[in-house]
Amino acid sequence: MYTEKVMDHFKNPRNMGEIPDADGVGTVGNPVCGDLMTIYIKVKDNRLEDIKFKTFGCGSAIATSSMITELAKGKTLEEAMKITRGDVADSLGGLPPVKMHCSNLAADALHAAIENYYKRRGEEVKK
Ligand code: FES
């Protein structure tokens, strides 16, 4: 049912944890299952220098959080804003259809963290 990549990211999540002095934080919840995900970012020269996540959710939500931190790290903020739910699922080799909604959380939390970063600086969100 799950690809090896999903299992790998679920069992060995990358970039799990918190960034206490984060430049932006985004939390989103899934109203269907009640799962919650928070993404923390550190920004330097308009790039995601560091990114971490904390997820209270299912295995797919953990795997997609882990994958999105790998996809986003080192990217410019504009590039990271363009990472979609589909990109996350594709990078994991696909998710079972009933679990596709779990990948929404990761993309939404990343975008919320970047929006929070712009907001803290009093800037408009660049999409
Ligand atoms: Fe809730 Fe996967 S079942 S995010």
Image (cartoon, rainbow, N blue to C red):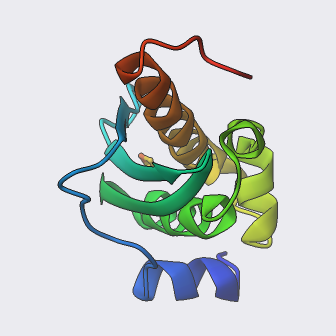
Residue located farthest toward the left when viewing the structure as drawn:
20
Would residue 67 be found to the left or right of residue 38 on screen? Answer: right
86 vs 60: above or below: above
Locate the N terminus by quadrant: bottom right
Q: Position of residue 74 (x, y in %)?
A: 65, 64
Number of residue marks: 0
Q: Residue at x 60, y 64 (%)?
A: 73
Q: Position of residue 26 (x, y in %)?
A: 38, 35
Residue 84 placement: quadrant: top right
Q: Position of residue 23 (x, y in %)?
A: 35, 42
Residue 79 placement: quadrant: top right
Residue located farthest toward the front when viewing the structure as drawn:
45
Q: Residue at x 35, y 46 (%)?
A: 37
Q: Nearer the viewer, residue 71 or 121?
A: 121
Q: Residue at x 42, y 50 (%)?
A: 41
Locate the C terminus by quadrant: top right
59 vs 122: above or below: below
Q: Nearer the viewer, residue 67 or 63?
A: 67
110 vs 51: above or below: above
Would residue 16 be found to the left or right of residue 81 on screen? Answer: left
Q: Residue at x 43, y 88 (%)?
A: 12
Q: Position of residue 28 (x, y in %)?
A: 38, 32
71 vs 57: above or below: below
